[in-house]
């Protein structure tokens, strides 16, 4: 029942309004005293709340002594709440847009976002803007499944490469337009001083544990690093040209010694240019 009350509040009813409406739906028709007993709304507030619900068209009154109240059908009430909510949303968007500055947007090369919703939203925007290949360094095995929809959408727009660290064996379904690789050969200095320290293993700084889940590179546009700090998921979006160049070079270096995974789970050495 608490979920129902919460949902009605999200749609625009106040908590006491939701409790009284739900009580009336259950008992169909009642006087104020009975509504108070069933809904749990304090009796001094019941008449005011019923008056508000009546004014909104969600409750009807039968004259008499005492007055009796009955509910308006839920489909009618919910449709009215949805209409009001949509209108408020559209009106808010229109007003907010008039407040936005007309000057050219300042170039801000670095963005930091927190939480799954924000991360997914920015990844969707990255894919919308992509005009070339998309490269993903996979350092956490759940990444392909977690972002399956985004990877499939990216594959419709251009070439997509997934590069897995050595201890992740991908066994999921293959997506058309996506190439799957696994890191194999790597320069010893690069492996020990860069890959192992910055990519493959958690970093600990001042009691905070940083773990990089994946690196998503939209060639010549932006790079998105998705990571956790003490189990809180975050993302860092970087459009600084020199950083893009370095991340692209790092990815290409790892890819140059990778094995390309085939659909039947065989792996073959990637053909490299002399």
Image (spheres, rainbow, N blue to C red):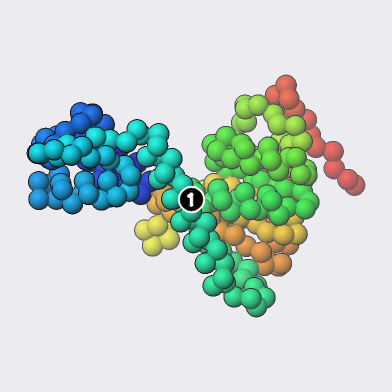
- Within 10 angstroms of label 1, few (less than 14), some, or many (20 or more) residues? few
Can you give x and y, in whole percent of width and height, for residue 37 in the image? 10, 36
At 18% across and 39% down in the image, what residue appears? 63
In this view of the protein, which residue sits in the foreground, 31 or 9?
31
Can you give x and y, in whole percent of width and height, for residue 209 in the image? 42, 53
At 14% across and 50% down in the image, what residue appears? 45
Q: Name the image quarter holding residue 129.
A: bottom right
In this view of the protein, which residue sits in the foreground, 161 or 269?
161
Q: Horizontally, is 128 left or right of 3 in the view?
A: right
In this view of the protein, which residue sits in the foreground, 91 or 197?
91
At 65% across and 26% down in the image, what residue appears? 173
At 78% across and 30% down in the image, what residue appears? 268
Q: Name the image quarter holding residue 57.
A: top left
Q: Is residue 45 visible?
A: yes
Q: Is residue 253 visible?
A: no
Above or below, 167 relative to 130:
above
Q: Horizontally, is 107 left or right of 15 in the view?
A: right
Residue occupying the far front of the picture: 64
Tally of numbered discs: 1
Q: Quadrant of the N terminus?
A: top left
Above or below, 271 relative to 201:
above
Can you give x and y, in whole percent of width and height, for residue 219 in the image? 74, 55
Above or below, 168 relative to 82:
above
Q: Horizontally, is 8 left or right of 220 in the view?
A: left
Residue occupying the far top of the picture: 264
Residue occupying the far right of the picture: 274
Q: Secondary structure at mark 1?
A: helix
In this view of the protein, which residue sits in the foreground, 132 or 254?
132
Q: Which residue is mark 1?
A: 86
């Amino acid at each position: 029942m608490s979920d129902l009350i919460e949902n009605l509040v999200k749609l625009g009813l106040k908590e006491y309004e939701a409790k009284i409406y739900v009580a009336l739906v259950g008992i169909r028709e009642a006087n104020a005293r009975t509504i108070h007993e069933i809904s749990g709304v304090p009796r001094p507030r019941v008449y005011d709340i019923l008056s508000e619900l009546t004014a909104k068209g969600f409750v009807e009154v039968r004259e008499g002594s005492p007055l009796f109240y009955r509910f308006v059908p839920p489909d009618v009430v919910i449709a009215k709440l949805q209409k009001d909510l949509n209108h408020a949303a559209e009106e808010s968007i229109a007003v907010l847009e008039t407040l936005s500055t007309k000057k050219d947007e300042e170039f801000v090369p670095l963005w930091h976002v927190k939480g799954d919703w924000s991360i997914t939203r920015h990844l969707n925007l990255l894919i919308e803007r992509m005009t070339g290949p998309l490269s993903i360094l996979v350092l956490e095995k759940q990444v392909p499944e977690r972002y399956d929809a985004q990877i499939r959408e990216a594959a419709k727009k251009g070439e997509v490469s997934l590069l897995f660290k050595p201890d992740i064996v991908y066994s999921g379904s293959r997506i058309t337009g996506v190439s799957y690789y696994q890191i194999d050969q790597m320069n010893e200095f690069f492996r020990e001083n860069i890959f192992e320290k910055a990519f493959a293993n958690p970093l600990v700084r001042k009691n905070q544990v940083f773990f990089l889940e994946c690196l998503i590179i939209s060639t010549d546009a932006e790079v998105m690093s998705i990571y956790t700090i003490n189990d809180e998921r975050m993302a860092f979006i970087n459009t600084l040209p020199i950083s893009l160049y370095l991340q692209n070079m790092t990815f290409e270096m790892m890819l140059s010694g990778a094995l390309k995974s085939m659909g039947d789970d065989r792996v073959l050495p990637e053909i490299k240019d002399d």
